Amino acid sequence: MTLPSLRAESSLMSRWCRFCFLLLAVAWVWTCGSSVAIAQDRTVNYNGTILEGRDMSNTDFTGTTFVNANMRNVDFHGSMMAGAIFTKGVMIGVNLSKADLTAALVDRTNLDYANLRDANLTSAIFTKTTWSHADVTGADFSDAILDRAAINYLCQSASGTHPITQIDTRESLGCRS
């Protein structure tokens, strides 16, 4: 064989190898991607939904996202919501009594008239959240992050002890006397 024909054969072989590699990569992504898609189908995302007035009590919402959702007067009592994300939500009158919101993110959410009695809010982050007339009796805010104004407001009416953690609500908020 001559040098030019070897180069042409080598170039053809290189293209063939690249094509096979690409074909294998696409096949791998297609087969592996389908199992990932199935896993994602089991994850519920309530972004932009209207849930107003629904009974969603005693349900596992661990890691679920509620972005820009209308949750006015929704009953979430007793629900597991650890690591859930609530952003720009309307939660006026929501019932979160005895709910577990450990390490949840609650950002720019309206919790006016919310029932948070005996809720576990440990390590949760509350930023730019409104709390007007919210009932936090017996709630545990240990290691939670709240705006100073929210803490001052909640301390005016905070009372009780969380029934499971036995932490005093005022103490967990860092209320002064």
Image (cartoon, rainbow, N blue to C red):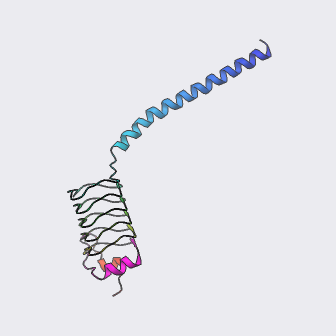
Nearest the viewer among 161 and 157 is 157
Residue 171 or 48: which is nearer the viewer?
Answer: 48
Choose top left, top right, bottom left or bottom right for residue 62.
bottom left
Residue 93 screen position, x and y as percent: 24, 67
Is 57 located above or below residue 116 in the figure?
above
147 inside magenta stretch = yes
The x and y percentages for residue 94 are: 25, 65
Location of residue 81 by image quarter: bottom left
Q: In which quarter of the image is the C terminus?
A: bottom left
Residue 118 higher or lower than 79, as above or below: below
Farthest-out residue, top: 1
Q: Which residue: 29% across, 64% down? A: 91
Segment tinted magenta in the rendering: 143-164
Q: Position of residue 22 (x, y in %)?
A: 56, 29
Which residue is pictured at 22% across the width and 56% down the height? 56
User: Is 29 placed left or right of 125 in the picture?
Assistant: right
Residue 26 as seen in the image, left or right of residue 18? left
- Seen as rendered, the residue at the extreme right is 3
Give the x, y percent position of residue 68: 35, 58
Q: Which of 117 and 161 is in front in this view?
A: 117
| Quadrant assignment for the N terminus | top right
Task: Name the image quarter holding residue 144.
Answer: bottom left
Q: Is residue 39 left or right of residue 50?
A: right
Number of marks in picture? 0
Please check the rendered image and state whether residue 45 is part of the magenta-colored stretch, yes or no.
Answer: no
- As drawn, the residue found furthest toward the bottom would be 177
